[in-house]
Image (cartoon, helix red, strand yellow):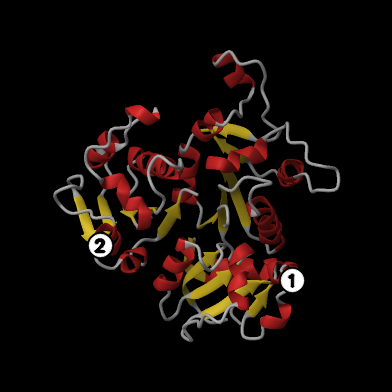
Amino acid sequence: MAAIQLQNYTLVITGAPYSSQAPQTALAFARATLAKGHRVDRIFLYGDGVHLASALSSPPSDETHWPGEWAGFLKESGIPGVVCIASALRRGLVDDAEQKRHELVASNLLEPFIIAGLGEWVESTMTSSRIIYFHAGG
Amino acid sequence: MSTLIVIDQPPYGTWAGREALDMAFSLAAFDQSVSLLFTGAGVNWLRKSQKTDGIEQKSIEKNLSAAPIFGVKAMFAEASACARYGLTIENMLAGVAIAENSSNLLHQYSHTAFSG
Amino acid sequence: MKPIATLHILNKAPEHSRSVECMRSLRAGDALLLTESAVLAIATTDVHDPNTTVYALKADVLARGLDDCASETHLVDFPAMVDLTAQAQNIISW
């Protein structure tokens, strides 16, 4: 078997936690990617996937806390977790800066996720050798 | 890298198509090669004279008509889906090419993406 | 491992319109990876093109109690899924 060339990945998650399996599949895939020696350039949350970055998710204690699991993985690995600003603001996900800008009552972006534009995804299309999408199933 | 954004979800009832267009326009804004393929119920984005006042959404028709100006290279509509939904050259937005075999198109791009 | 032209990653149930579209798009030399709800295809009698290798994510197969039906499908774990994505020339996430 020929050696597999090392790649650099961007993972785009568009499926929301607790309404799709996407965050679980993507996290298991991300861990395996690093274990295999590949690089992960960034995680990009788009569409309904932005709910994964909510600091307010409170699932029952016997269910996996997907935002927490993801935040822990991002902190350990140092991989940037980027939340699309347009998707996020529409769906009520804001950091402190957006809270001030839009004069909202609270912010709820879970650390270490950051909010940025689709330009981050565009950059991935230019620099990552692999882009894998994790959509909602059905 | 040349990107094909595929829109297979119908207009207005879901935000997926709108968010797919945002992806296409972002790539174009950064001078990246991008084309759009409308398949299945997604071809209904291409119908002329969408009057959206009553559902309080912005019509996407103007944005789509301006896609070539923004740098979107090509817009394709799957032939069988157009036939199914009664879309013809007469009632469809200008500038859309009919793709007889959309799966052939998929294999011509290095990067294919759905918005959700 | 055989070279893969396009790796199709499918996570929708067999009746989903995107599953139908994915099956129509398979070509000789491509590979199909079933994940999440898409592994239910294993329980059906749908026939796959013999020119396409079909893989299924083991955790999803086991979760749905389908390991007895999976004889003709290559079951893969996440490290093997990573290998498939690393060696495929193109990837479509359906």
Is disc 2 surrounded by few (<14), some (14 to 19) or many (20+) residues within 10 Å?
many
Q: Which residue is mark 1?
A: C62
- Residue C82, relative to residue A76: is it above or below? below
Q: Can residue B35 be seen by looking at this rendering?
A: no
| Residue B53's disc number | none
Seen as rendered, the residue at the extreme right is A61
Residue B18 or A30: which is nearer the viewer? Answer: B18
Tell me where residue A132 appears, x and y as whole percent. 54, 56
Kindly identify the residue that appears in the image at 45 percent across and 68 percent down.
C20
Q: Amino acid at mark 2?
A: Ala
In the displayed structure, does residue B37 sit left or right of residue C65?
left
Instruction: Decide: is B61 above or below C45.
Output: above
Q: Residue farthest to the left?
A: B90
- Name the residue rendered at 67%, 77% in the picture: C75
Q: In this picture, is C19 found above or below B95?
A: below
When asked about the image quadrant of residue A92, the answer is top right
Question: Taking B19 as reference, is A98 left or right?
Answer: right
- Residue B76 picture location, percent across and down: 27, 55
Q: Would you identify the image quadrant in which residue C44 lies?
A: bottom right
Q: Residue at x 72, y 45 (%)?
A: A70
Tags 2 and 1 on a common chain:
no
Residue A28 or A122: which is nearer the viewer? A28
Q: Which residue is mark 2?
A: B79
Mark 2 touches mark 1? (CB < 8 Å): no
Q: The disc labelled 1 sits on which kind of residue?
A: Leu
Q: Chain of mark 2?
A: B
Q: SS of the residue at dot 1?
A: helix
Q: Chain of mark 1?
A: C
Q: Secondary structure at mark 2?
A: helix
Considering the image in quadrants, where does the N terminus of chain B appear?
bottom left
